[in-house]
Structures are given as structure tokens and as C-alpha cells.
Image (tube, coloured by chain):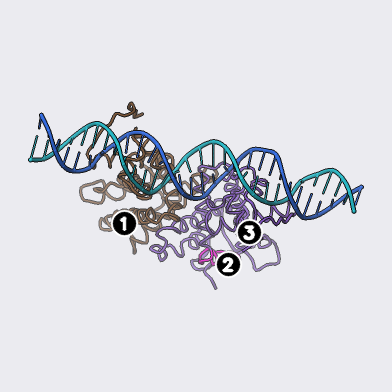
Chain colours: A brown, B purple, C cyan, D blue
Amino acid sequence: MTSRGPGKRVRKAPAERRNEIVATAARIGLTEGLECVTLRRVADELGVQPGLVGHYFPAADHLVAEAFTGATMAELDTLLPEEAAGPGHDGPLHTFRAFFGLTSSAEFDNVSRLWLNARHLSRYRPVLREHVVAQELLWCRRIERIVLAGIEAGAFTCADPWAAATRILVAIDGTSAYINTSAEHRRVPTADMARTVAETELGLPPGTLAPS
Amino acid sequence: MTSRGPGKRVRKAPAERRNEIVATAARIGLTEGLECVTLRRVADELGVQPGLVGHYFPAADHLVAEAFTGATMAELDTLLPEEAAGPGHDGPLHTFRAFFGLTSSAEFDNVSRLWLNARHLSRYRPVLREHVVAQELLWCRRIERIVLAGIEAGAFTCADPWAAATRILVAIDGTSAYINTSAEHRRVPTADMARTVAETELGLPPGTLAPS
DNA sequence: AATGCTATTGAGTACGTGACCAATAAAGCA
DNA sequence: TGCTTTATTGGTCACGTACTCAATAGCATT
């Protein structure tokens, strides 16, 4: 991919190089797993010496943690764009339809794997753990905002938006827990579960959030 | 724990030694994580040379896989004893009450961690993957049997027992997905979710499966 | 009591990891 | 233009892993 002859140096502004490193680490983490995010692996990918990556990340844990945050942050912005909760849009109902459409598609598989990966690795890596907790709460808050917008617009009925958001995420995370194992065997009974849970939580008739 | 002076050999029957090794590996996997199940670690625990463990398990993957199966199999028998589905017992309703009581308690935390651990590690380790899939289906089938017994006894109403069992497990696995991260923040909204999902799936009035 | 089988030892190889650091060359500034 | 700063190189180091294998010693059988 990125290959330069030996000895050739390319000197970049620290901020730019740092971003490069994090972006590469995020891509590796998303597609191959966070344990593949090593100083050497990232350096190879960038056509650079391992020492350089170590220079920007004296502790490898921080690189892994930032890789995770980078990947999930980007994904969240795809799934639930910030502006979706604001005014002048298709409305919360359409936002959720798109959301459940995406989370049910195969594109989401790598994201499921990443979450599973990060949640387990957090057992041993405190730095990563903090980033994962922050992202978990961020995702939950982002959903809560859509719920709030829907209540305000009179589209949803829900006594506790935070609890509803939490339980919707349980359904999503529960469904994607089998992504590396018996996902095939479960596709049928679990395909609509997250959507159904959401409809129940938001006081919607069954099928309301199904793709149009 | 088990310490012998150097050079002292204890020679055991192969089957017995093998069981010892798997039992130790299962304990380590359950309490410290499957990546701690190494030839060295298990050998240390048994007061034995690493080469011996390597003799019984020429590929370390198989040891990890058997450790997982050993631990989850034992746990399943605690949670849903085989005979619970048979005749002459407190009945399916009581069985499920006990089940949800246990899965909600802190004793279950290590089991949640183990499942998370194994489901992620299955991404890289095909041998473990097969064992995990087998256990996942076994747990699901065991629940399905209780559901079937309950339907037969007229206690439950359920059109598709297998699908119901699958969705109950989604709720349980979803709830326990945060065991290493933001579990504290979610305890309140998710505490009763698995039980509630089960009551819905089985056509029971809310609270029927709550601890008595 | 002697013998054979084999469970067990103890040291070996090869590999991948994170961390460390002096030397070097590229970029910006005087 | 020359000088200073520092991003980058290219190694080394110690550690932990799986795996290999000849030699050894415990047990069971004769």
C-alpha cells in the first residue's frame, strides 16, 4: 500500500501525523480487531518505523483506545447524524427507520465485532475501558435525544426516554452478540427484535419502524 | 496452592490428569479470562511442568476450548438442571423464577464475562468457535425444553418455543454485555428486562416470573 | 524382584510483543 | 544563508507465548 524506499524520510506536522496514525489504527481495529492494533502493525501500514508510532503513543494502550473511539465515533455519525435531532428534518420516526435499517444490515457486522472486541478487552485495559464507557453513554444519549424529539413532536409516547434508549441498545447489543459464533442460526427469530423493542418502548404500533 | 519440591514426580492415570488440567483451565478461564489459559499458567497452577500440559494438549487452542466448555457446562447445570424439565418437580414457572434470580445476581458476573470473552475470542480461534456455538445452542435448547414443559402444563402461551428461547437469551446476553464497562450506569433500566421479555414471550402477566 | 511402558521432566527453539534510545535529516526560523 | 529544533530512523532489550524432544523416573505387570 504505502511503500517508500528505505531511508527516505517524510516529515509531517505532528498533528497531521498523529491523525494519520489514529485513522490507520481505527481502520485496523474495525476490520481486523483491536489486538491487531500494535505499534508495528500500524507502522507497517503507514510505511514508517515502529519507533515513530511509539513516539506519538508512548503507551500502546492509548493508541488502541483512540482507535476504538475514532472508529465508533465515525460510525455513530453515520447511524445517527447529529443534526437528525435538530429541527427542519424528516423527523425522529424516519431517523429511527434509517437507524434500524442500518443496524440490521451486514454493513454493521464489523461494528458489532468491534463493540464485542472492545467490551471484552476493557476487562484488562483500563484506558480502553474509559473510552468504551464514554462511547456507550454517548450512543445512549444520542438515541435519547431522538426519543425526546419524537415525544416533543407527538410521535412517541414514553415515560422515561433514558431507560427506553438503554433498553433499545440492550436489544441491539444482545442481537449482535452472536456475530462471531451462531449468528446464522439466530437470524430469523432475532431479526426484528430490536425494532420491536423500540416500538414497544415508544408506544408505536408494530411495524411502524419497519423500513418503508 | 499445589506446590511440590523440584524433581518430585507424581504420575497419574492419563484420564485423571487430563481432567485435572481441564478443570484447572476452566477455573482460570472463568475467573481471570480465557487468554490467561496458557500452558504455563495451567502448569504452574498444578505444580507441574508446562511440557506436561503440552503433552495432553498439543495445540493450546483445544485446551482453551475445553476450558470454556467445562465452565459453561457446569454453569448451565446450576442454572437449569437437566431434571427441571422432567416430571415430579416444582414446574417450569418455578424453574424460570430461580433462573432469572440467578442470572440477575452478582454470582453470574463471571459467567457474563466468560461468554463475552469467548464470543470475541471465537473471531480468531476456530476451535473455540465451534465449542461456543455448541454451548450457545445447548443453552437455547435447554430453555426451549422448559418452555415446552410449561406449555404442556398449561402455564405458558407461546407459538414458537425456539424463537422465544432465542429472544430470552438475547435479552440476557444484551444486558450482560456491559459487564466490563458501563454496567453500573445501566443497572436500573435493564434490571428487569430479561424477565419482562420472558413474560411477554410466554404470555404471562407482568411480575409472574419475579422472585417470590 | 526384575522389566517394560509411558507419564513426566527440563531445557531447548522461534516468534511477536512493548519499551527504550542515540543518531540522523528535514523543516522552520534567524 | 546558516542554525536550531525535532520528527524520524533503526536498532536493541526483556518478556511471554507455543511448541519440540531427548532423557528420566514412577507404576504395573510379570
Q: Quadrant of residue A197?
A: bottom left
Q: Chain of mark 2?
A: B
Tell me if residue A121 is in the magenta stretch: no
User: N-terminal of the two: label 2 or label 3?
Assistant: 3
Q: Quadrant of residue A45?
A: top left
In the displayed structure, would residue A210 be above or below residue B1?
Answer: above
Which structural element holds mark 2? helix
Nearest to the eye among marks 2 and 3: give it.
Answer: 3
Residue drawn at x 32%, y 54% is: A138
Circles 1 and 3 in contact, beta carbons < 8 Å: no
What's drawn in magenta, residue-wise?
B94-107
- The residue most toward the top is A5
Which sits in the foreground, B13 or A161?
Answer: B13
Residue drawn at x 56%, y 41% is: B126
Amino acid on which disc 3 is placed: Ala
x, y percentage for residue B192?
Answer: 46, 65
- The residue that label 3 is drawn on is B74
Residue drawn at x 58%, y 51% is: B40
